[in-house]
Image: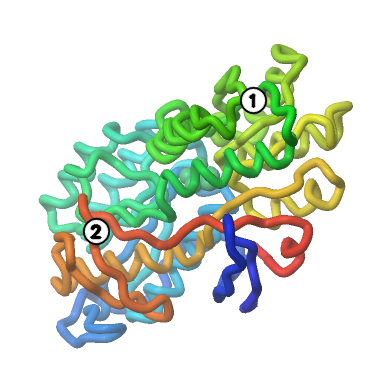
Amino acid sequence: MRARVRLLAMTTIAALAFTTAACAEDTSGTGTGSGPSAAASGGGIKSGLKVAFLPKQVNNPYFTTSDNGGKAAVEEFKGVYSETGPSEASPSAQVSYINTLSQQGTDVIVVSANDQNAICGALNEARQAGAKVVTFDSDTDPSCRDLFINQATSEGIAKVQVKLISEAIGPDGGEIAILSATANATNQNAWIEMMKTELAKPEYAKLKLVDTVYGDDDDQKSFQEAQGLMAKHPDLKGIISPTTVGVAAAGRYLSGSEYKGKVQLTGLGTPNQMRAYVKDGTVKSFALWNPADLGYLAAYAGGALASNLITGKEGDKFTAGKLGEFTVGAGATVLLGEPFVFNADNIDELNF
Ligand code: RAM
């Protein structure tokens, strides 16, 4: 599906193209090249590059969307796309996949890390064997990758969620809790730290963070953790869940409970997983970026690295197909944009 929609950004109305394919998971290679060729395609990127996506977990709709964005990019620059990865988002589960990809002579590994350090050894071995490593969504320690593709600033992601829970609860404030992904997740942990900084500001003095729990990006565990929060904190007024798995599970729990519409919920969710809870009044609004664009940008960045168009140093520029030109920032990072807010007004326009 290709849709141009108008989304409500944090403070402004921003028009942007959402070019997202809500497709089924694809784990097959799609190209036919027998090795990278100097013949350039797709903005100077060599054709035939083997580009593998390794998400935190494969059975998560968020990563299905992001990786399909990557697949579209790889097809544009005539590479060989594949996706592989664990079904559980545990810290070291990605190591064996990295080793296999390296043995297969993969040119670019695009990975969302379950742990900042657990996969570093395997990634560095793959780099020594010739692979370029691009982290996206959730970073490793910077010493283990060539570039990190950041979906939005941690500050922006933190601010929008605190603002949304505050607006949903109203001026009286009260107790709130965080339902996160895994305890080791680099991305969620960075956002949680920034949310604490945000909550310390005077305008949020009436919001009190009383607990942080971890659903491990597992639907059932996240559901039970949401239930547990209500049992443990009877005065809870709101939950922030900065994970698409957690916020959907918490939405399902709250919508079928006595707390529906009374205990507020926001976080980072996909429109397709959250639509029902927006429509039934469980959730007023939530945020996310375009996961397909994130994967698309990560694939182009990997292609540019593997074609020696960039090295990952600050100021390097490359073109990411339909998304245009990007510049590498400090710490070998590339920024996609800022998060967007989804609510009853726009949720039907989006399909991912
Ligand atoms: C889950 C994963 C992912 C995160 C999103 C918001 O799908 O934890 O890493 O970026 O939520």
Q: Is residue 206 visible?
A: yes
The quadrant of the image that shows the C terminus is: bottom right
Name the foreground residue: 180 vs 199: 199
Tell me: residue 41, above or below residue 215: below
Helix, strand or loop at mark 2: loop
> Rounded to the nearest whole Å, what is the CA distance between mark 2 and mark 1?
36 Å
> Which residue is depicted at the point 65% across and 72% down?
6
Residue with the most extreme left position: 128
* Badge 2 density bin: few <14, some 14–19, many ≥20, Cα 10 Å: some
* Badge 1 density bin: few <14, some 14–19, many ≥20, Cα 10 Å: some
Upstream in sequence: badge 2 or badge 1: 1
Quadrant position of residue 124: top left
Type of the residue with mark 1: Lys
Q: Is residue 93 left or right of residue 220?
A: left
Name the foreground residue: 346 vs 137: 346
Residue with the mark numbered 1 = 206
Question: By what rule are the colours in the image chosen?
Answer: rainbow
Q: Is residue 96 left or right of residue 198?
A: left
Question: Where residue 310 sits in the image (x, y, percent)?
Answer: 16, 69
Q: Is residue 32 visible?
A: no
Residue with the most extreme front position: 202
Question: Where residue 93 sits in the image (x, y, percent)?
Answer: 39, 35
Q: Which label number is shown at residue 143?
A: none
> Which residue is depicted at the point 14% across and 71% down?
308
Tell me: residue 13, above or below residue 118: below
Question: Where residue 319 sits in the image (x, y, percent)?
Answer: 30, 77
Residue with the mark numbered 2 = 329
Question: Where residue 268 sits in the image (x, y, percent)?
Answer: 59, 46
Name the foreground residue: 336 vs 205: 205
Helix, strand or loop at mark 1: loop
Name the foreground residue: 279 vs 139: 279
